[in-house]
Image (cartoon, rainbow, N blue to C red):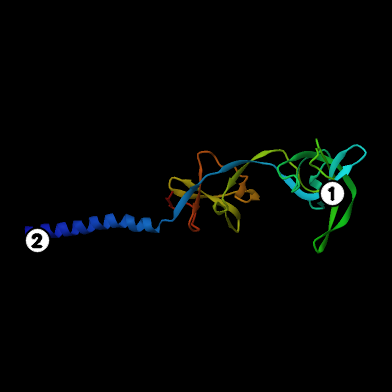
Amino acid sequence: MKVKSAVWTMLICGAVTAGLIAAPEIVLKNIPTAKVVEIEKIQHIDSVSLSGTIIKNLRDDEFIVQIYVSEQDISKVKLGQKAEITGVAFPNLTYSGEVDSISDAASKIQVGNTQKTAVEVKVKINEPNEMLKHGYTADVKLITSSPCTMNIVPYEAVNQDENGEYVYILRDGKTEKRYVETGAELSDGIELKTLIMDNECIITVDKVIENNSSVKITE
């Protein structure tokens, strides 16, 4: 009887031990996987880009670029505003310039098959040279803000529900759902205006999960 009893004890303990070993594997399979997201800090300058025509003032040898700014953007344009001028006729050169005049009236201009309301703006080119010709087309980038540092995260890091946009913060192996404010949308990510502390990690999760859920971090 003692032998049988010992055998049964070994079998039962073995089964329990096997269950304890297997259980974590089963649990881990059900835990969502997540990746840590790095917040990229970039220097950003707001600008308005337009195309126009170079005009030479024969009286004083000045060169200006005549552009038409849409009524949606004209409030961003100010006298003396800095500009960068490039063109296909001078591909390796970038000229600096500044807004010299803004028309007092708007006019209708033809853009493709439609008419748009726009305001004539003249940009004076600083230090022109022989590469510039009257009648050339030019691309003008008007600098409309001072340089600022933006925090950029991938689009997939920002989620949304009926209460707004949010990110997942990793805290002790679990998720903290935090609502955030976003800003500019760039080609490589979206601006995160809400402050995230240096010791906090934003994560992306492979599916929508509840707040305070366990996650498994992958590289």
Of residues 41 and 175, the one drawn nearer to the viewer in this rendering: 41
Q: Quadrant of residue 90?
A: top right
Residue 167 shows in this picture: yes
What distance separates the C-alpha of mark 2 from that of mark 1? Answer: 104 Å
Disc 2 packing (10 Å; few <14; some 14–19; many ≥20)? few
Q: Amino acid at mark 2?
A: Lys
Mark closest to the chain's N terminus, 2 or 1? 2
Q: Element under label 2?
A: helix
Residue designated by label 2: 4
Q: Nearer the viewer, mark 2 or mark 1?
A: 1
Quarter of the image for the N terminus: give it. bottom left
Judge left or right: residue 148 versus residue 77.
left
Please name the residue shown 60% across and 50% down the image.
189
Disc 1 packing (10 Å; few <14; some 14–19; many ≥20)? few
Of residues 159 and 65, the one drawn nearer to the viewer in this rendering: 65
Q: Amino acid at mark 1?
A: Gly
Of residues 40 and 22, the one drawn nearer to the viewer in this rendering: 40
Q: Is residue 163 above or below residue 87?
A: below
Please name the residue shown 47% across and 50% down the image.
35
Residue 157 badge: none
Residue 209: % across, % down: 49, 57
Residue designated by label 1: 135
Of all residues shown, which one is farthest toward the front? 130
Residue 24: % across, % down: 33, 55
Q: Is residue 183 above or below residue 4?
A: above
Of residues 143 and 183, the one drawn nearer to the viewer in this rendering: 143
Judge left or right: residue 156 versus residue 87.
left
